[in-house]
Amino acid sequence: MISILRRRLPITTSFPYISILTATPAKLMDSAANSFGGSQSLVALAQQLRHYKAPRMPFDDDSEEATFEESAGKVVSQVGVVESATPISRDPQRFRPKRAAVLICLFQGEAGDLRVILTKRSSTLSTHSGEIALPGGKAEEGDKDDGDTATREAHEEIGLDPALVNVVTVLEPFLSKHLLRVVPVIGILNDKESFKPAPNPDEVEAVFDAPLEMFIKDENRRVEEREWMGNKYLIHFFDYETENKKFLIWGLTAGILIKAASVVYQRPPPFPEQNPIFKILENVEKDTALP
């Protein structure tokens, strides 16, 4: 049974990007605010994020990529690491990962907090069933850019009309457990009331939203230490409950949201992220993966 879940939270601290508004002419702000559902806070956020520049990686071109597969073209993984933390980014001739994108769709909640749309994957799927994910998947022929990929996949998975989303920036790519290159795309939902979730039952069991700020707080968080090639690293788990439903957000999805929250709120998390220490592999095969 498909459930559509929402939750109202107490008003949190004001967004750090409000001060940007003072430098913008009133008429321009009013016009821009109309395109963001009347919210000047979202206008200021969009302005802040459009100035953000993710580190450029050697794969940022149209060169041939490897055809590694993961979860039937979808983006779910137990492990996700920013690409700059890997030697792959410094040795692009050895390995060119397949490209994918996920949508970090933000909107202002009724309590004034900033929230992100998440999905629970169908329990009938053969891989990563029941896990929490951001809408997204593999790039396809015809996608103009990562924003196109992310919004197209969100439309296919949860019925989110791309016209409702203003894509404002992309974050540094992550490498998933199976070395899939995942580009996080931040988009702002113009009008939350116009979005009527229509999950694809073959892929999505539930659509819900969570406060973005929770991913840079040390509440409802736990970690698991793992080891790869003799080096220890941490996997983060966030417990979230809404309307008597419990969700566990972890792995690649948690890692991406920690980064997104750090960029939006302009402060690092109060806990160590501890990415794995990668070593350059002599051979990168189809089945090469982190543990």
Image (spheres, rainbow, N blue to C red):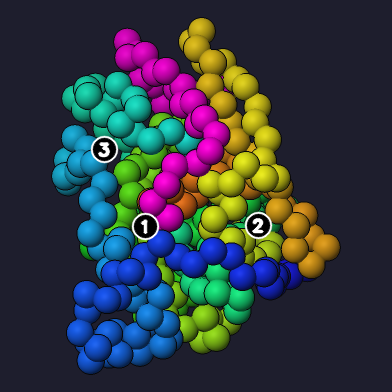
Residue underneath mark 2: 120
Reply above or below: 96 against 104.
above
The type of residue carrying mark 3 is Glu
C-alpha separation, residue under disc 3 versus residue under disc 2? 29 Å
Q: Which residue is mark 1?
A: 185
Relative vertical location of residue 244 with respect to residue 175 in this rendering, above or below: below
- Circle 3 residues within 10 Å: few <14, some 14–19, many ≥20: few
Q: Please determine whether, in this image, residue 275 is positioned above or below residue 277.
A: below
Q: Which residue occupies the foreground of this view, 231 or 148? A: 231
Upstream in sequence: badge 1 or badge 3? 3
| Type of secondary structure dominating the magenta stretch | loop
SS assignment at label 2:
strand
Q: Residue at x 20, y 84 (%)?
A: 25
Q: Say if mark 1 contacts mark 3, CB within 8 Å.
A: no
Q: Secondary structure at mark 1?
A: strand
Residue located 58% across and 31% down the image:
235
Residue 65, numbered label: 3
Is residue 265 magenta-colored? yes
Q: Earlier in the sequence, mark 1 or mark 2?
A: 2
Looking at the image, which residue sits at the far top?
Answer: 230
